[in-house]
Amino acid sequence: MKIILLAFLSMALCSIGSAQGNKQNKSIDALKKESASTLDSDYDAYKKIALSIWDYAELGFKENESTALLQNTLRDNGFTVDTGVAGMPTAFVATYGSGSPVIAILAEYDALPGLSQDNSAIRTPIANKNNGHGCGHHLFGAGSVATGITIKKLLESGKLKGTIKIFGSPAEEGGGGKVYMVREGLFNNVDVAIHWHPGDKNAVTYTSALAYKSAKFRFHGNSAHAAAAPEKGRSALDAVEAMDYMVNMMREHVPQESRIHYVITNGGKAPNVVPDFAEVFYYVRNPERAMVESLFNRVVNTAKGAALGTETTMDFEVIDGTHDLLINKTLALNMQANLEKVGGVKYTPGEVIFSKELQSTFTGNIPSIDAATIINPLQTEKNQGSTDVGDVSYVVPTVGLETATWVPGTSAHSWQAVACGGGDIGIKGMMVAAKTMAFSAIDLFMDPALIQKAKEEFVQTKGDYQYEALLGDRPPALDYRD
């Protein structure tokens, strides 16, 4: 009789647990539907914000109008906003709610130099404008703010409990805004960080990024008349060119996954004046942060050799440095399910015409336009980019995705990406990201076990490594774009 009774009680408890689980799932589904409906109803408002930032096209640490627009939008929606955090005037942290869990949404808003372009499918720079959002950070900022406000409304109504934070991080393009935020300890109390990035497909991030370190190398020589008294001159430009030559020879003797890029930012002013100052800006990348440090030191040695050989002097300034990206499978699987629930981007007939015209300017293999509608499976792919999200991923479990804000086949950092970001193709992809991030945030707020599992994986993946910024203890390089 006791055995029968115990069996009956066990079945009853399972039935109750199953019923409670089904009830919670229905509740979560209802919240996701509500959040998607909210975002759809606010489409035009977030489009206006994104296109305003697209028009501002402000460079890193100079995003004054862009950050003001995002901050004011968050304040108007009940967030408390801390500005100028971590020594960066255009950085902010916006907070709503209290208690656990604390979910962070990352936002970016800096543009790139030399990519001025209107929103047409032919190369058309905008008069009197140099910059352009070739990486889509205007969408990144507006979409993340949209997610944050949507979650805030659920917290405000009592349907969710906890805290939502929006981290407004400037100068991702070479300035490392998030690195300073991490170094300042601003993520210390965050449970999970969520991010996204514009792209030409819909996929959850399941591949690490390249760690990297950058610096400006400055050479100082003696000026002289290049024709009348060349023997009195010591050319700083010769030193830059000697350094560049040695680095290019070094490429044969580095791991093949490495990437080294440079631009001469100052090479003198006139051919008949021996330049007494020249500057070259270098990026060094590799999948392993330790290898980045090793390669960077070798690049420094080429600069020292160039200075010795040209009888000039040299100094250098580390500008930025970011970690590789830690992948959290627990969070990625959750986000994949949510991205599949949201679905891809559907084009109107007019957008199909625009897309085909734009693709006619591409080189190489050109994917089908229909690729924008597809959700890519969760898989490891080759990634040769870098991001300061990597530093965030070393202090808190982090998950992200890419959505089709650009016509399939579009390269980042191109005028074509700027053109796509200036119209509804970009906005539609942004809203796919906003909904997916909102869905994932809802799961995290409603399921403490999901956060716990993500944290356990994070600890195991990170191992014994203690975070240390690759850019050292330098203050933010607020003038790095000057």
Image (cartoon, helix red, strand yellow):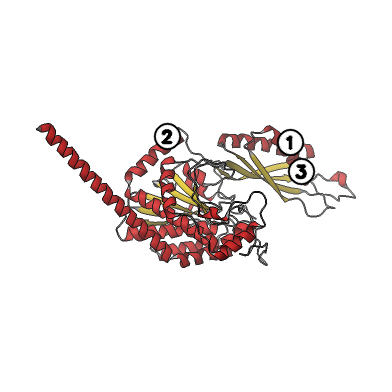
The amino acid type of the residue labelled 3 equals Glu
Percent position (x, y) of residue 453? 36, 40
Identify the residue under disc 1. Answer: 249
Q: What's the CA distance linking mark 2 and mark 1?
A: 40 Å
Identify the residue under disc 2. Answer: 460
Q: What's the CA distance linking mark 1 and mark 3?
A: 12 Å
| Residue closest to the eye, 231 or 5 | 5
The amino acid type of the residue labelled 1 equals Met
Mark 1: few, some, or many residues within 10 Å (few <14, many ≥20)? few
Is residue 203 visible to us here? Answer: yes
- Left or right, 179 with respect to 317, comes to left
- Left or right, 276 with respect to 482, comes to right
Tell me the mark number nearer the camera, choosing from 1 and 3. Answer: 1
The amino acid type of the residue labelled 2 equals Gln
Percent position (x, y) of residue 16? 21, 45
- Left or right, 113 with respect to 192, comes to right
Residue drawn at (27%, 47%) of the image: 21
Percent position (x, y) of residue 110? 56, 57
Q: Secondary structure at mark 3?
A: helix
Q: Quadrant of the C terminus?
A: bottom right
Question: Measured along the vertical axis of the image, is residue 322 above or below residue 350?
Answer: above
Mark 2: few, some, or many residues within 10 Å (few <14, many ≥20)? few
Q: What's the CA distance linking mark 3 and mark 2?
A: 46 Å
What label sits on residue 241 in the rendered view? 3
Residue drawn at (46%, 62%) of the image: 71
